[in-house]
């Protein structure tokens, strides 16, 4: 599958159509994952690989809370399940993809629901 050079306008239509997505946030002056990303996109056709140039797509970088580059983010079923700032070796990326594929999403959804329920605040009584 070819790499998607993601623009903000594409995000809403991309997520529902792709179960497994890996984002590479980069800039022209910092491109350590370029060749590696292309090789992995050929090996893992069931995964959508997206490159996001943070200099051109600042709002996407803000949305994903990218604070430094490179940053890699793994998404499954529209949920960011892992994000890493800094360079990752090929073995680490492959392990991350394998873990993403095997992730128990029913448990992830349950954990998110429980976290949301525990974060609901109740007014304090004086």
Image (cartoon, rainbow, N blue to C red):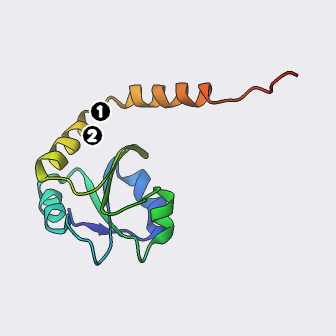
How packed mark 1 is, by other alpha carbons closer than 10 Å (few <14, some 14-19, many 20 or more), is few
- Single out the residue that lies furthest toward the front: 126
Residue assigned mark 1:
103
Check disc 1 and report its element: helix, strand or loop: loop
Side of 121 relative to 58 (left or right)? right
Q: Where is residue 93 in the image (x, y as percent from the top left)?
A: 19, 49
Q: Which quadrant is home to the N terminus?
A: bottom left
Q: What element carries label 2?
A: helix
> Residue 89 placed where, x, y %?
14, 53
> Where 64 falls versus 57 (above or below)?
above
Q: In which quarter of the image is residue 11?
A: bottom left
* Residue drawn at point x = 27 percent, y = 40 percent: 100
- Asked whether, in this view, residue 112 is left or right of residue 45, the answer is right
Marks 2 and 1 in Cβ contact (< 8 Å): yes
In which image quadrant can residue 121 be found?
top right
- Which quarter of the rendering shows the C terminus? top right
Q: In this view, does 9 lie above or below 74?
A: below
Is there any visible trace of residue 57 in the rendered image?
yes
Q: Which mark is residue 100?
A: 2
Residue 124 location (% of width, % of height):
81, 24
Residue ID at (47%, 68%): 8
């Amino acid at each position: 599958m070819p790499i998607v050079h993601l623009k903000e306008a594409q995000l809403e239509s991309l997520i529902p159509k792709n179960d497994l997505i890996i984002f590479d946030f980069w800039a022209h002056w910092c491109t350590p994952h370029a060749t590696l990303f292309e090789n992995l996109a050929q090996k893992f056709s069931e995964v959508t690989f997206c490159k996001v140039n943070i200099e051109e797509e600042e709002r996407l970088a803000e949305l994903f809370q990218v604070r430094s580059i490179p940053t890699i983010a793994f998404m499954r079923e529209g949920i960011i399940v892992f994000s890493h700032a800094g360079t990752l070796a090929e073995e680490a990326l492959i392990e991350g993809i394998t873990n993403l594929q095997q992730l128990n999403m029913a448990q992830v959804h349950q954990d998110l629901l429980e976290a949301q329920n525990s974060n609901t605040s109740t007014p304090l009584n004086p």
